[in-house]
Amino acid sequence: MNDRIVPDKRQMTLALSDTEMGVLDGIANQKGLSKTAVIRQALRLYQMLDSRMAAGERLFFEDDRQQKKAEVMVL
Amino acid sequence: MSRPLRVIQLQRRDAPLVSCELLAELTPLELLSVDEAWHGDRLAMMRQLMQREIPRSQWPQSLHWDWSRKVLAAPQLIHSVYAIRSESKWLGAMLIRADPRYRVRLGPEAGKEIVYVDFVESAPWNWPVPALDQDVSITGVGTALMLAAVEKSMEEEFGGRLGLHALPQSERFYEAFGMTRVAADAWKQGLVYFEMTQTQAQEAWRKGGWT
């Protein structure tokens, strides 16, 4: 016996502009994921960045080839 | 409150199957109760190992783990905590992450997302410890938790792909589970990194009889 119990999921409607929907479609196609999976991943990333920055850490992009390092501002 | 994911049957040594609950989304309080339940077993085992003067190299390598610290380090959506429970006894626990920073290293799937297994452990009273003449009493706990990680990876549309760094005593288990040994990572105390492809995940899923 190995019975899977169906998980609870809540649904919502998301209103996006054509441009935003185009970006979401593009990322989903590029990654081979559904739009729901992209949104869930973005939410995880956002929460992680937000909590670490709230704790005083800073976020940087670094380019070794051009020897550039720039702090990323997150709203 | 945790979410029951599956009811599974595990094999007890010389006894009937034991019915267990696989739980997802354990709360920090529930994981603390796992830690409390196992803490005394860890100390008792450490005492026996010392009394018998067993070399440290033969001690179980997760003997010092402290799940309460892992709880505090993992309060976010990228983390998921699973456990297996039977008749109010905790049989195993696992902390995994669906973290965009972790990606496939090997083969044509390189660069794609994976679920990374941070920690997975069965109850100390269920470890095989030859130096103490202790054997596994309920088999399949680790495999069931790893299949739960595969299932999470499928739910996230990562195709069942997994990655983890193995303790040396667990390397054979991950190879038997179907994972590929990649390389030892100096930045991870020299632990060997293992990876499971989509094809390997489907095979493990089929072997495990999960649907």
Image (cartoon, rainbow, N blue to C red):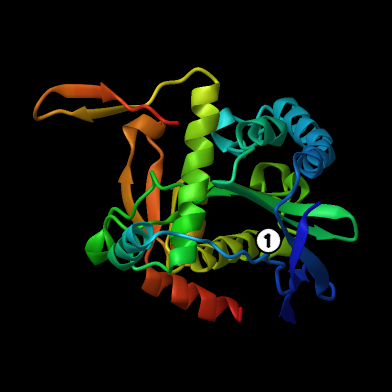
Q: Nearer the viewer, residue B135 or B85?
A: B85
Residue at (72, 32) in percent of width and height = B68
Residue A52 makes an appearance in the image: yes
Q: Which residue is mark 1?
A: B141
Where's residue B37, x and y in %?
Answer: 84, 41
The residue under the point 53% across, 79% down is: B207
Q: Position of residue B104 (x, y in %)?
A: 33, 55
Q: Which x, y percent locates residue B128?
A: 67, 51
Residue B106 is drawn in which quadrant? bottom left
Q: Residue at x 45, y 59 (%)?
A: A16
The chain letter under disc 1 is B
Horizontally, residue B31 falls left or right of residue B102, namely right
Question: Quick check: can you spot residue B168?
Answer: no
The residue furthest right is B87
Estimate the x, y position of residue B133 in percent, counting from the top left.
72, 48
Q: Amino acid at mark 1?
A: Val
Mark 1: few, some, or many residues within 10 Å (few <14, many ≥20)? many
Vertical comparison of A4 with B149: above or below:
below
Q: Specify the farthest residue to the top.
A: A56
**Tag 1 secondary structure:** helix
Q: Pick the residue in front: A15 or B116.
A: A15
**Residue drawn at x 66%, y 42% as measured from the top left:** B131
Marker count (numbered): 1
Up the image or down, B25 lies above or below B211; here it is: above
Q: Nearer the viewer, residue A10 or B134?
A: A10
